[in-house]
Amino acid sequence: MPHVLAQYHSIYMLSFPSEDLVLRVSGPHLPKIKTENEAAIMAWVSKNTSIPVPRAVGYNSSTKNALGYEYILPSRAPGHALSDVYKSLNEARISAIIDELIDMLAQLHSHEWPQIGGLRFDKAGGFEVGPVLEETFWQVPDIVKYWPAGESVDTLNIAGPFPSYVEYITAHVRKYIYLIKVHESLAFMRDIIPRLEIFLNALTRDADELNQVKLRLAHKDLHFANVLYDVDARKITAILDWEFSGIVPFTRWNPTRTFLWNGHDSEDDLAEKQRLFQIFLDRCHVGNIKIPEDAAFSSPKQEDMQLAANFLRAITEVTPRSQKIDVVGGWKDAVLQRISSFGA
């Protein structure tokens, strides 16, 4: 039996005389690309930064192996999930943790990238930008459950890589139009397709303004359950779960706003996340770290572009699942409000 059942993996702890390993056996959610992305990103981060990541002893992105599943085999890092020990830490330790995280983020931020996407190994064993990978993608179990026969990971999600912010958003919106046409639950959105097409044309027209953004590698889900901390050594020992990491328009470095979340859902815990984030902002300002500035939208139109795509994603994500039926009409109105600034 696995030691842990995670959302995308069964996890087994393996002990050997020389080293402890973690066997993470993948489910069939996003075949091939998720395993390849995580293995490549962990290797790139290890090679190009001092950020502590588990060493990937091996991986297999095929199901044609002895296990019959994709897997990745990282080393087991010492320490405990920061989410498990956070409430036992005093303010001085919390302050030092924020400083450690700022240093790690600054290292990632110092590397420029030419495209938006994930990472994969090239034929020479180096690295190249690969397809985009996002946790909000339609994945195999739900495709089978909610979509007509013949639809797949490839037909329902964007691919990439993309050379610019506009081309990335354009691909998303074109895919959302496809979903609206295919799934009957989304029929209520079909009347705005002509306006979405006008919006897409305007993105091309305004590309010079809209593409004013840095492309950077981001973890995208850096909450405290993904941070290992050694209480005795008083330091972060590993950053985990890079599977959905990738090179993003930097406005998307923290898309679900989980950075500095301690893993608990009470109002006090959510307020604590906001408190820590303000400390993070203040420390960046004092240290002349440009992460907050580079994460800000460069113009109102750029923000409207991203928010229009966000609302479209939300509508096409929940409606086929018969979720949030009472709010999707308001989200449709929000899409129309945002694209109206483009003359659509």
Image (cartoon, helix red, strand yellow):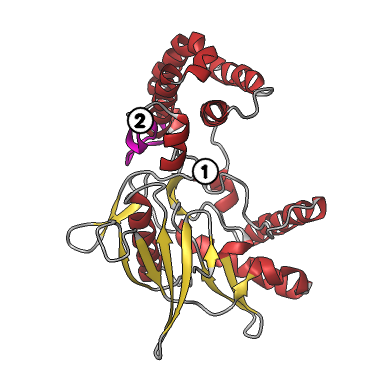
The amino acid marked with disc number 1 is Arg
Across the whole image, how many numbered discs are drawn on residues? 2
The residue closer to the viewer here, 304 or 195, is 195
Q: Residue, x 67% and y 54% (percent of image)? A: 281
Question: Is residue 339 among the parts visible in the rendering?
Answer: yes
Does 5 sit left or right of 248 as displayed?
right
Residue positioned most to the left: 124
User: Which residue sits furthest front?
Assistant: 1
Q: Is residue 58 above or below residue 249?
A: below
Q: Residue furthest bottom?
A: 17
Whether the residues at callouts 1 and 2 have beta carbons within 8 Å, the answer is no
Write down the quadrant of residue 132 in the picture.
Answer: top left
Position of 74 relative to 161 (above/below):
below
Give the image quarter of residue 318.
top right
Main SS, magenta residues: loop
Helix, strand or loop at disc 2? Answer: loop
Q: Position of residue 173 (x, y in %)?
A: 43, 25
| Residue 203 located left or right of residue 124 | right
Residue 323, how many percent across, how many down?
A: 62, 29
Q: Residue at x 39, y 17 (%)?
A: 201
| Disc 1: CA contacts within 10 A as few (<14), some (14-19) or many (>=20) | some
| Residue 344 visible within the image | no
Nearest to N terminus: mark 1 or mark 2: 2
Between 188 and 143, the residue placed more toward the observer is 143
Write the residue at 65% across / 81% down. 234
Residue of label 1: 252
Q: Magenta residues, as a range?
A: 152-166
Residue corresponding to mark 2:
151
- Residue type, numbered disc 2: Glu
Give coordinates of residue 22: x percent, y percent.
44, 73
